[in-house]
């Protein structure tokens, strides 16, 4: 491989790493917040589990995006064809609904239950909104404990709707950050064969390095100071710029006295 | 000019004297001769609880950018339309129910299909239309409003499920030319109420309502979606008894009955 081509390849990987880094930094907090809020919603409604189901394509097909509860691992990634089942209806109609005896005749949920080994007895589904558009469905299944389960109440439906709005904003942000990650992958693999595992390994190594962690800690510190207000931000910027000028002039800093 | 009477004063008069133009005869009607359109996910017409009650079934089909409606035997894709039909039929067993499927089939769904379905239902000249669904797309608000006005002028009573969500949902927020319904925990469909102060006008049973569902089954369902067909059923009874009522008069009669119901409860 020529030197020029090698440099091009390296530059491409460097770009991808940068984008991937941003996407992962962004999505880490969002993933954590989404998990926490979904769990909180599930507990508030005393449900056995809750799922965020999102539109997957323009046809209106849905996919389990996040889930908490007994079979959450098996649910994530499962697909629901457009308009099918209660989730499909709620996503298309915008009308929340609850069913207190799902039962085995409901072919769609019976199919999912067969895959997960779970038994869906009661269900509440409400739309997930972002910026006035329905982006998916928030679904609650069963109660914690043993059946028979008390049906979901009208008050719980209203409560679920409020969670639906907050979760909608988080889901939208998380999907956007994941898209950035996908963009990085595309950038890597657009023209020539690239070993994704190797790149991911490289990124993981980079993250594990003490220097990388320190950089992140400094970034968090700057963010915290910046949040105090305009004056703090300006001062912080001035100090950092002064530091940059100093290092450019002197070449390096000796940290041993710090 | 005499002194204007406040809303509170008007309410007080109605509470004491009532609007006594509707007697109880309508409660014994069956909806015979009244044509109802249910714009929803389709209806399972051979369900034993609906046998002989479903007249025509239409389904949306995309033709380029246009949405066409054709006779269909694809049934119900979600169960919701069948549930609504079961509730209407439990109150107005002899009403003629028609299905306009706008949700669920491949390539259909979304706000524009919903709008096209409502327009088709109005063109069919149904006496009452059940809209247990809505859209949050604000760009559809104006065309929907125009359509509702067209229906109103044609004498079509349009009943929509309200939306308790944080976002406004169309058309239930337009209360001028339709009847907007939310759920209550009452179980007697005749004992419905009304609400002031927001766009929701009537409150009908919508909690754990037992009704027809997919594959010949029955389910207990909760939601404004299931309060809406209760009022549709009642409107069918009213229209059978008073065939010449305009949508305005139907709404006034419903208010009057709801007022009496609430008086009875508070006594």
Image (tube, rainbow, N blue to C red):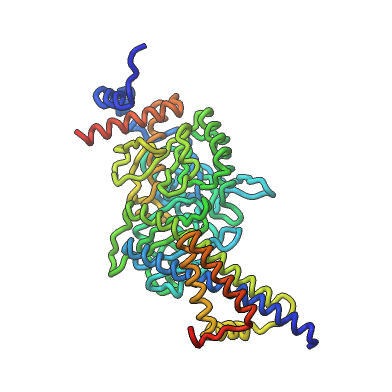
Which of the image's four quarters has the N terminus of chain B?
top left
Q: Judge whether residue A52 can be spotted in this image.
A: yes
Where in the figure is residue B137, as x and y percent of width and height? 54, 47
Displayed quadrant of residue B142: top right
Foreground pick, A168 / A81:
A168
- Name, please, the residue furthest toward the top: B1
Displayed quadrant of residue A32: bottom left
Task: Say above or below: B224 vs B215.
Answer: above
Which of the image's four quarters has the C terminus of chain B?
top left
Foreground pick, B93 / B114:
B114
Name the residue at 40% across, 70% down. A68
Name the residue at 55% across, 44% down. B138
Name the residue at 37% across, 52% down. A158
Task: Say above or below: B82 vs A202.
Answer: above
Task: Say above or below: B132 vs A143.
Answer: above
Where in the figure is residue B239, as x and y percent of width and height? 42, 30
Name the residue at 68% across, 74% down. A187
Foreground pick, A102 / B48:
A102
Displayed quadrant of residue A15: bottom right
Position of B55 with respect to B253 (left or right) is right
């Amino acid at each position: 491989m020529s030197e020029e081509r090698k440099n091009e390849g390296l530059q491409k990987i460097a770009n991808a790493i940068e984008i991937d880094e941003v996407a992962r930094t962004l999505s880490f907090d969002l993933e954590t917040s989404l998990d926490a809020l979904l769990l909180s919603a599930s507990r508030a409604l005393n449900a056995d589990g809750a799922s965020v189901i999102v539109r997957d394509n323009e046809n209106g097909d849905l996919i389990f995006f996040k889930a908490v509860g007994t079979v959450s691992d098996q649910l994530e990634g499962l697909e629901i064809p457009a308009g099918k089942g209660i989730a499909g209806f709620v996503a298309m109609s915008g009308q929340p609904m609850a069913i207190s005896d799902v039962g085995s005749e409901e072919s769609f949920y019976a199919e999912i239950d067969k895959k997960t080994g779970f038994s869906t007895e009661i269900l509440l589904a409400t739309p997930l909104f972002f910026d006035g558009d329905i982006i998916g469905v928030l679904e609650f299944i069963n109660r914690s404990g043993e059946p028979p389960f008390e049906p979901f109440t009208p008050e719980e439906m209203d409560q679920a709707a409020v969670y639906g709005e907050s979760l909608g904003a988080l889901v939208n942000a998380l999907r956007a950050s994941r898209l950035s990650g996908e963009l990085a992958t595309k950038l890597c693999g657009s023209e020539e064969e690239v070993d994704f595992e190797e790149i991911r390994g490289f990124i993981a190594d980079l993250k594990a390095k003490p220097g990388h962690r320190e950089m992140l800690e400094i970034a968090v510190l700057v963010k915290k100071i910046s949040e105090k207000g305009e004056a703090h931000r300006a001062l912080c910027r001035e100090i950092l710029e002064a530091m940059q000028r100093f290092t450019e002039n002197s070449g390096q800093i000796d940290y041993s006295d710090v | 000019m005499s002194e204007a009477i406040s809303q509170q004063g008007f309410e007080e008069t109605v509470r004491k004297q009532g609007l006594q133009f509707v007697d109880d005869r309508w409660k014994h009607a069956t909806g015979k001769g009244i044509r109802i359109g249910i714009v929803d996910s389709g209806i399972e017409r051979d369900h034993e609880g609906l046998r002989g009650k479903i007249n025509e079934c239409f389904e949306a089909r995309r033709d380029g950018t246009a949405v066409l409606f054709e006779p269909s035997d694809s049934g119900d894709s979600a169960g919701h339309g069948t549930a609504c039909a079961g509730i209407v039929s439990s109150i107005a067993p002899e009403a003629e129910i028609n299905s306009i499927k706008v949700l669920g089939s491949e390539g259909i769904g979304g706000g524009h299909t919903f709008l096209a379905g409502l327009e088709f239902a109005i063109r069919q000249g149904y006496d009452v239309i059940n809209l247990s669904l809505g859209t949050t797309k604000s760009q559809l608000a104006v065309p929907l409003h125009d359509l509702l006005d067209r229906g109103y002028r044609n004498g079509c009573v349009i009943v929509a499920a309200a939306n308790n969500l944080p976002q406004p949902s169309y058309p239930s927020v337009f209360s001028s030319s339709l009847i907007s319904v939310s759920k209550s925990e009452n179980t007697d469909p005749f004992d419905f109420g009304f609400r002031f102060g927001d766009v929701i006008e009537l409150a009908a049973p919508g909690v754990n309502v037992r009704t027809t569902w997919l594959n010949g089954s029955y389910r207990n369902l909760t939601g404004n979606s299931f309060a809406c067909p209760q009022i549709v059923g009642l409107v069918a009874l009213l229209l059978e008894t008073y065939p010449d009522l305009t949508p305005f008069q139907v709404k006034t009669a419903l208010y009057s009955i709801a007022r009496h119901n609430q008086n009875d409860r508070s006594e």
